[in-house]
Image (cartoon, rainbow, N blue to C red):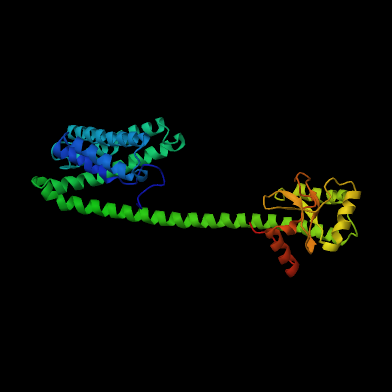
Amino acid sequence: MYLLFHLIYATVIFPSAGIALASVLLYGNRAGWGIFIGAFLLNTIASDSARTDLNSMLITFAISGGATLQALIGGYLVQSFAGKPNILSNNRNIMLFFLIGGFISALVNSTLSVWFLVTIGSMPVEISILNWLSWWGGDALGIIIFTPLTLVCLSTENPIWQGQRLGIILPIFTILLLMITGVIYEIKTSNIRIEMEFNERAKILETIIKTSINEDLNALKSLNSFYNASESITGHEFNLFVSPSLKNHPSMMNLGFAAIIKANEREAFENSLKHQGALDFHITEFNLDKKLVQAENRAEYIPIRYIEPKNLTGSLNFDVYSTESHRDAIDRARDTGELSITKK
């Protein structure tokens, strides 16, 4: 799995492509049936949870058919131009095998499969070229490395292969080991780089969030100072003071002021609201059905006196101390003298 690209269907090295071509070279076109079945099973297992929906089945059939066609075409081209049966018997044949068997025949499945995936909408066009290059490269390397290995291992009766076996296996395994080591190293260094970039971006985001929160807290502190410096504040004065803060701090949905009213002050408080022309002058709370009703009798109330913007229906005169979440936050603020937030 270390050799997987962060793409959709391609790998850095695809050994099956090389084994498939070697099968055709050894056993002829009849090996195509085995290649198709093997490719079908491999793609079924590799797909997401081996899904059986129509789209996934079409993709599996298309990729398996492309792999089979690639092996058959590659086998024909290699045997036609690189010599038969000893395709690696001399330098000319070796170069032709690399060119035709590796780089040219690998174009078949990568081109057909990527085209099919883009056509049915399973692969975005934006990443199709990168997937095609990765697919082609993975198949080409798989053919260049694993076709000779398979031929050497399975052609036990051919004296030419027997004499070349060690000379072919050792260099190829050395190259393969170096490639795997390089890929693993690149993945590890990439992960380190990604982690460092993530941490840097996280720090920037943390700074932005902290700055935004501190600005909001400063707005609250300025409102507190405004009240401490005033004997009494009207709704109009409250609006004039908090409107700039709400405009300059989009993260703040609203600002309000709630007064502490003792039980023996409730009647006078509600009468004063009534005399001011307020339509809803009773202190309210939610009942068990979450409907606003007149607050029950208790030792103290903390009704909302002013709030901006004024688009929160039923907020004025609502006793925030009647809800558990607000009550806990208010008690913490009173006991510690610090700012407090409600629980979710």
The answer to which of 142 and 316 lies nearer the viewer is 316
Q: Is residue 312 left or right of residue 81?
A: right
Can residue 56 be seen? yes
Q: What's the residue at 23%, 46% (across, down)?
A: 146
Quarter occupied by the C terminus: bottom right
Q: Residue at x 57, y 54 (%)?
A: 201
Identify the residue at the far top of this view.
119
Left or right position of 76 against 2: left
Q: Is residue 254 visible?
A: no
Image quarter for residue 44?
A: top left
Residue 322, relative to residue 75: is it above or below?
Answer: below
For the residue pair 48 and 3, the one nearer the viewer reads as: 48
Where is residue 310? Give x, y as percent. Answer: 79, 45
Please state the horizontal and vertical placement of residue 30, each as a whole percent of the image.
Answer: 16, 34
Query: Percent from the top left, x then y, of residue 198?
Result: 53, 55
- Tell me what residue is drawn at x 79 percent, y 64 percent: 299
Quick check: 183 left or right of 306? Answer: left
Q: Nearer the viewer, residue 242 or 117?
A: 242
Number of marks? 0
- Give the x, y percent position of residue 103: 29, 38
- For the point 32% across and 53% down, the residue is 180
165 lies above or below 228? above
